[in-house]
Amino acid sequence: MDALPAPPPHAAVRLILCRHGETALNADHILQGSGVNPPLNDRGRAQARLLGARLAKERIDWIVSSELLRARQTADEVAAHHPTVPRDVFADLAEISWGVLEGTKSPDIAKLHTAWDQGDFDYSAERGESPKQVSQRAGAQLFALIDEARRRPRAASGPYTIAIVIHGRLLRILLATLLHRSLFCMPAFSHTNCNINVLDFVTPPSPITDLPLLRTLPPADLAAFAETHFAQQAGHPTSPPPHVRLDAAPAMVNLTHAHVWGGKPGDGILAVPWTRADIGKWTTIEDVAKSLECDEVVTDVGADGFWLVGTLISETGHLVEADADPTD
């Protein structure tokens, strides 16, 4: 297969975010979450091997996963092609806790989705976690990894690259947070087993501000950009089906957030600024909410901030030999 897309100019850190392979509970439509810890099944191991092979020729400087077995076993297959690369596991990269629903088959989570679709991101299953709680703990950990990567020595050319194996709902929460500054966008992301998402963190100086601020585009241009963008996020070559589409109004609201800039015309790629002040807010749930709700246009991230570019979302071409199931 072709190499992953080249990073933008001045990219300092690249994150390759992947979901773990399938487990027997996935296959049986049993909700896992952070409190259920099964191994990969045969299909999941095959998917993980395909993921490892897909990343075999990519530059990888650090391999990271959650502590959960399904993520660690998937990361093993990536590490098999990069045996000298350091590895770490982090508890704060665990899947969302579904509370009393964990371990149940095909649970009714309609109330959760309804609450989240209406913007109640503090809502959770009984004894479980809310999206806002997960965004805070996992987002803080991700920013810590980025800061550490920026301190580490790297090759003369190319960004320091971290391969991170985590979980389906967590991926939706993190991608919605990082690329849209809004948890409303969780449903727009696909989370196929062993998919690949590439985020590049671009440091000043950069040409990012030459891109259009999406809120300034004419309605027809914005609609066309949105169609391309959400189709890419959902992992479909055309418009995503209704169950992964956002209603028109929330989609426009999130794409016209003050922080969201567009990529090249027609490519659907977003560029989002993160200042050091933004990153510093990822310590409490209340501060996370303030950062996500900020409506001040940012054109300068400062010397210690960065622009985040969603270079590749929901790539699954390497999984042609192993079908994947989207169950959390």
Image (cartoon, grey):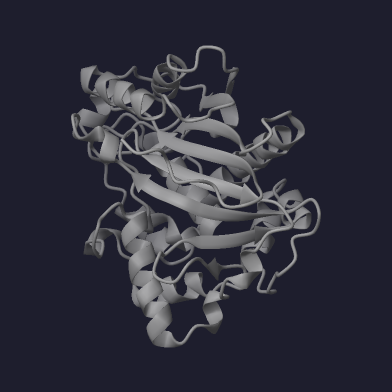
Q: Measuring from the top left, give residue 95's x and y in whole percent.
A: 46, 34
Apparent side of residue 305 relative to residue 103 in the rendered image (left or right): right
Up the image or down, 158 lies above or below 176; here it is above
| Foreground of the two, 24 or 278 | 278
* Residue 151 in the figure: left or right of residue 174: right
Q: Who is closer to the viewer here, 105 or 190?
A: 190
Residue at x-position 43% and y-position 67%? 118
Q: Residue at x 62, y 46 (%)?
A: 136
Query: Relative to residue 279, is residue 41 drawn left or right?
Result: left
At a point 36% along the width and 47% down the height, the residue shown is: 314
Quadrant in which the C terminus is drawn: top left
Q: Is residue 134 above or below residue 39?
A: below
In the rendered image, which quarter is residue 155 located in?
Answer: top right
At which x and y percent is residue 167? 42, 35
Q: Is residue 267 above or below residue 286?
A: below
The location of residue 278, given as percent across then percent down, is: 72, 56
Residue drawn at (56%, 72%) of the image: 257
Task: Let me know if residue 130 appears in the view.
Answer: no
Q: Residue furthest right?
A: 303
Q: Is residue 200 above or below residue 77?
A: below
